[in-house]
């Protein structure tokens, strides 16, 4: 299977059109960072837009 395999997701979700919502930077800045304690995942496909 590929990294983009979605066979474990219901078609109800995979058939929906993608919708991006803008992030509220103030909301993100105020998130309790303790929620992410020990979290070390880094998306290998993340691209920084300059």
Image: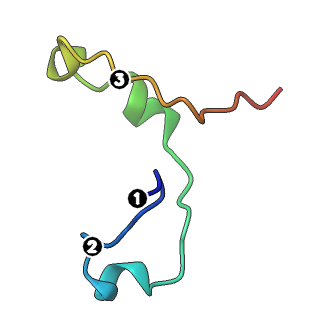
The residue carrying mark 3 is 41
Looking at the picture, does residue 42 appear above or below residue 27? Answer: above
> Dot 2: what SS?
loop
Write down the quadrant of residue 11 in the picture.
Answer: bottom left
> Dot 1: what SS?
loop
Q: Quadrant of the C terminus?
A: top right
The residue carrying mark 2 is 9
Question: How many residues crowd around disc 1 within 10 Å: few (fewer than 14), some, or many (20 or more)?
Answer: few
Measured Cα–Cα span from mark 3 to mark 1: 21 Å
Question: How many residues crowd around disc 3 within 10 Å: few (fewer than 14), some, or many (20 or more)?
Answer: few
Measured Cα–Cα span from mark 2 to mark 3: 21 Å
Along the viewing direction, whichever of 21 and 41 lies nearer the viewer: 41
Pointers 2 and 3 in contact (C-beta within 8 Å): no
- Label 3 or label 1, whichever lies nearer to me, is 1
The residue carrying mark 1 is 1
The residue at the point 16 percent across, 14 percent down is 34
């Amino acid at each position: 299977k590929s990294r983009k395999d979605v066979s474990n997701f219901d078609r109800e979700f995979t058939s929906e059109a993608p919708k991006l919502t803008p992030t509220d930077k103030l909301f993100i800045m105020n998130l309790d960072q303790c929620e992410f304690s020990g979290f070390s995942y880094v998306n290998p496909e993340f691209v920084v837009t300059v």
